[in-house]
Image: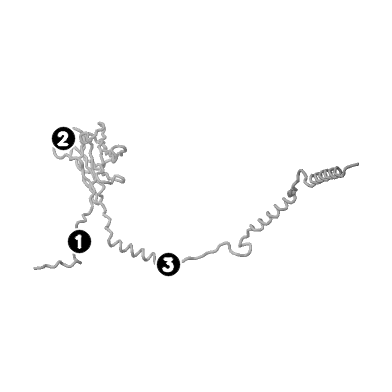
């Protein structure tokens, strides 16, 4: 005789096994995720062509002359005075009334050596065969000066050159002197020359230094102011403004009332 309790226990075990089997069947060990299929080469090519055609359609260029129009468009503008320009002009006019005029310098030349004369000059010519006799300013040419050179008459063929510098002998130039007609006195002759200051050497105390060469058939002779060189300096001066300032002060005082005098 089989016990009902044992049968009931067996049934319960079978039910539990069935439940476990059902649970295992309902929950799979892995759950695959479906993937989206990529676009094919045909689809990508079609999309590219569609975009390319759309962009090309928006970049079409046409010229006006193909449709009967003009290639140029001319516009004319007329200049007119503005209020700002008028105001600037008035301001400049008022400013000019009180602006101090620019002072232009006055130039003059001054020899930096004492030229010989009389017996001393003739003695130097006999010794050195030549000597600078005179330096003079040039009228209406404030930057220029002329000079006269006395030479000994030792040769019929003769030439005189002035070698000058304005930058302390960094550079120099040779200038031919001209014979002074009618200057022959039997023992000596005269030659003349002209030199001039030039930018940038036109400032206060600029100097032109020079020496003299005398070429003859007997040889070449030099004169250099006893080894100190001949020199001419440039002087600058400006117009004196004291008179203008005095007149201005008088005008200023003229508009003031005289002080009262109490007695």
> Residue lying farthest left?
263
Instruction: Please tell me which residue is depicted at 63% across the width and 60% down the height of the picture.
Output: 62
Q: Which quadrant, please, contains the C terminus?
A: bottom left
Label 1 residue SS: helix
Instruction: Please tell me which residue is depicted at 21% across the width and 58% down the height of the picture.
Output: 245
252 vs 196, nearest the viewer: 252
Q: What is the number of the mark on residue 249?
A: 1
- Of tags 1 and 2, the one toward the viewer is 1
- State the CA–CA distance, disc 3 to disc 1: 42 Å
Where does the image place residue 260, in percent across and percent down from the top left?
Answer: 13, 68
Relative to residue 54, is residue 216 depicted above or below?
A: above
The residue that label 3 is drawn on is 80
Report if the CB atoms under discs 2 and 3 are less than 8 Å apart: no
For residue 40, say whether it is visible. Answer: no
221 vs 140, nearest the viewer: 140
Instruction: Please tell me which residue is depicted at 78% across the width and 45% down the height of the picture.
Output: 28
Left or right: 237, with 22 as reference point: left
Label 2 residue SS: helix
Left or right: 56, with 102 as reference point: right
Left or right: 211, with 74 as reference point: left
- State the CA–CA distance, disc 2 to disc 3: 79 Å
The quadrant in which residue 180 appears is top left
Query: Of callouts 3 and 1, which one flags the residue occurring earlier in the amino acid sequence?
Result: 3
Instruction: Please tell me which residue is depicted at 74% across the width and 47% down the height of the picture.
Output: 33
The residue that label 2 is drawn on is 123
For residue 74, say whether it is visible. Answer: yes
């Amino acid at each position: 005789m089989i016990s009902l309790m044992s049968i009931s226990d067996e049934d319960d075990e079978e039910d539990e096994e069935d439940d476990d089997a059902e649970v295992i069947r309902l929950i799979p060990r892995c759950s695959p995720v479906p993937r989206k299929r990529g676009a094919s080469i045909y689809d990508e090519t079609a999309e590219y062509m569609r975009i390319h055609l759309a962009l090309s359609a928006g970049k079409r260029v046409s010229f006006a002359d193909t449709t009967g129009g003009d290639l140029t468009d001319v516009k004319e503008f007329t200049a007119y005075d503005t209020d700002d320009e008028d105001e600037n002009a008035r301001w400049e006019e008022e400013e000019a009334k009180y602006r101090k005029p620019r002072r232009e310098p006055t130039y003059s030349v001054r020899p930096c050596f004492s030229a010989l004369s009389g017996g001393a000059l003739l003695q130097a010519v006999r010794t050195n065969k030549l000597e600078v006799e005179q330096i003079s300013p040039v009228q209406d040419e404030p930057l220029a000066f002329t000079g006269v050179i006395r030479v000994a008459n030792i040769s019929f063929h003769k030439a005189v050159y002035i070698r000058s510098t304005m930058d302390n002998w960094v550079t120099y130039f040779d200038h031919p002197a001209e014979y002074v007609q009618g200057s022959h006195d039997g023992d000596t002759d005269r030659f003349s020359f002209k030199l001039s200051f030039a930018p940038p050497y036109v400032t206060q105390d600029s100097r032109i230094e020079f020496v003299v060469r005398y070429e003859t058939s007997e040889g070449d002779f030099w004169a250099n102011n006893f080894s100190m060189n001949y020199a001419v300096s440039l002087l600058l001066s400006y117009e004196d403004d004291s008179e203008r300032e005095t007149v201005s002060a008088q005008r200023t005082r003229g508009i003031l009332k005289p002080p009262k005098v109490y007695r």
